[in-house]
Image (spheres, grey):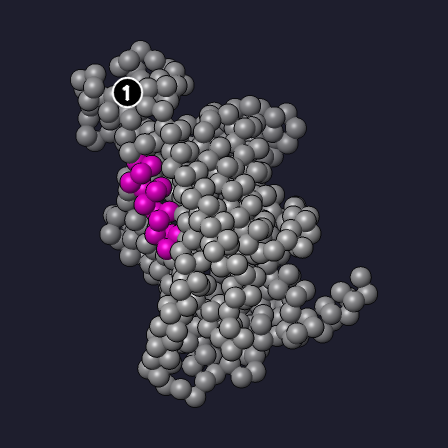
């Protein structure tokens, strides 16, 4: 304990400012991102946009994928022009994007505005990580990055709780809340001191030539490229937590058992995190972040002595089982248990990915290899967007199944109906209550069949990583 206290005292002010910036940024990002899938696809009565699942997949997959590709460029921009200037630009883009995004209701407009938001996030991401690296040394970096990742997890957990609290009857306010949190970062940035030696003398064009010229150095390392592609499979499965699960819960899961529990024991939750009939889907999915905050230290202690690949293989498999089970049932308590299983796998695998990349990188190219560790997340988001978009729409989307029912039974419909009106009027035409109609659709179309797709992707990644492990020995 004394050593930790001594280490903490060595961190400069900028280290603590950077960690606080990260905390608020994650609160703002996950505060809207956890709700984004239902905002894009939900019924217009709640202020949602009623996009198709395929359109949602394009926006979230491509937009977030770009976010993880751009740091290669934005990192070079920060090295050229200084960290504080780039952080200022990032927060201005963040704030304006959050305020503008709900003003766009067309697919193209929303898509472009989300990409604009992603640019702000891409400017922020490499700078804040580099600040932590530059304000720590060999003896303080371990605890320093531990504090940093703790801020990431706390922000990820608190963000959705804050925005859901203010959501009310529609989604507009969540964007304003996220914008307000980023404005706090603009104020806090005044206490940020530029770390030493952050600027380079190269022109921006020369920096870009160096960045993209060294891609081939990475691509020629066949072992590294194969590893990145396998890990991309894990991220495709993992990202269904944000892309698919909130939509699946909102469309198919009866949360009244859990809602009644909160009404009796924690009425604050029942009042602010439900519509009076069902708990907010994002409140339930946010338990994953709570599990990580509560159990990451325990899981890390268990797998600490495991070889990185063994921990990743186990984590991939456990997380795949958990994520598949979350979309297998309509039972909310079963889903929460499955999320806990998923979180155990996530905690075992995710930190070890970075550790392994650092292990296999040549001593003189560690920074280069770490810089390209974004590739799995870039590919993962593209793949996750397709799975949660076109594949989910075909296999599991409730609205698609309502339209199929209307066509099969030759029922009347009105093209001006909202998604909710389509559902309500079709149930009425079939002389069913809304709960009975949901159960009819579930039994007829089996929307939980998507579990096989999700599990298949994760299992394939685990098997390929096991084969990779055996071959590289």
Residue range (magenta): 379-393
Whole-percent x and y of residue 32? Answer: 45, 49
Closest to the observer, 160 or 142:
142
Residue in the image at 55% along x and 46% along y: 315
| Residue 50, placed above or below residue 352 | above
On screen, residue 26 versus residue 53, left or right, reads right
The local secondary structure at tag 1 comes to helix
Q: Which residue lies under the disc numbered 1?
A: 425
109 drawn magenta: no
Q: For the view shown, which residue lies furthest in the right direction?
A: 2
The secondary structure that dominates the magenta segment is: helix
Closest to the observer, 459 or 179:
459
Whole-percent x and y of residue 229? Answer: 40, 56
Closest to the observer, 360 or 19:
360
Residue in the image at 20% along x and 19% along y: 408
392 drawn magenta: yes
């Amino acid at each position: 304990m004394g050593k930790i206290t001594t280490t903490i005292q060595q961190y400069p002010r900028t280290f603590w400012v950077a960690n606080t910036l990260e905390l608020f940024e994650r609160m703002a990002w996950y505060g809207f991102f956890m709700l984004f899938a239902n905002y894009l696809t939900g019924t217009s009565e709640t202020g949602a946009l009623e996009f198709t699942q395929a359109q949602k997949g394009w926006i979230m997959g491509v937009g977030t994928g770009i976010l993880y590709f751009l740091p290669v460029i934005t990192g070079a921009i920060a090295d050229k022009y200084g960290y504080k200037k780039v952080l200022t630009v990032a927060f201005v883009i963040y704030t304006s994007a959050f305020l503008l995004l709900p003003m766009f209701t067309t697919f193209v407009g929303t898509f472009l505005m989300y990409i604009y938001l992603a640019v702000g996030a891409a400017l922020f991401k490499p700078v804040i990580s580099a600040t932590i690296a530059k304000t720590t040394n060999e003896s303080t970096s371990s605890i320093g990055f531990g504090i940093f990742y703790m801020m990431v997890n706390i922000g990820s957990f608190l963000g959705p709780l804050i925005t859901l609290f203010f959501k009310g009857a529609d989604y507009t306010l969540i964007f304003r809340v996220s914008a307000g949190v980023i404005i706090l970062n603009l104020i806090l940035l005044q206490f940020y001191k530029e770390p030493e030696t952050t600027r380079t003398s190269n022109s921006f064009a020369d920096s870009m030539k160096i960045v993209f010229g060294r891609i081939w150095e990475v691509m020629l390392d066949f072992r590294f490229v194969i590893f990145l592609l396998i890990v991309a499979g894990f991220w495709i499965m993992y990202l269904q937590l944000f892309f698919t699960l909130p939509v699946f819960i909102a469309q198919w899961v009866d949360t009244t058992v859990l809602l009644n529990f909160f009404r009796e024991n924690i009425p604050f939750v029942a009042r602010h995190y439900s519509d009076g009939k069902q708990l907010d889907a994002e409140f339930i999915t946010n338990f994953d972040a709570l599990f990580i905050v509560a159990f990451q230290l325990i899981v890390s202690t268990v797998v600490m002595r495991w070889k990185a690949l063994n921990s990743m293989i186990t984590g991939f498999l456990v997380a795949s089982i958990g994520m598949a089970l979350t979309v297998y049932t309509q039972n909310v308590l079963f889903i929460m248990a499955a999320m806990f299983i998923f979180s155990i796998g996530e905690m075992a695998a995710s930190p070890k990915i970075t550790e392994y990349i650092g292990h296999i990188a040549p001593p003189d190219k560690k920074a280069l290899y770490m810089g390209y560790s974004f590739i799995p997340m870039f590919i993962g988001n593209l793949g996750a967007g397709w799975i949660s978009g076109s594949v989910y729409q075909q296999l599991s989307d409730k609205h698609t199944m309502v339209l199929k029912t209307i066509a099969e039974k030759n029922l009347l419909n009105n093209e001006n109906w909202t998604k909710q009106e389509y559902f309500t009027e079709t149930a009425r035409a079939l002389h069913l209550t809304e709960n009975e109609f949901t159960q009819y659709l579930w039994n007829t179309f089996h929307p939980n069949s998507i579990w096989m797709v999700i599990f298949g992707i994760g299992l394939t990644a685990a098997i390929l990583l096991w084969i990779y492990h055996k071959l590289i020995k």
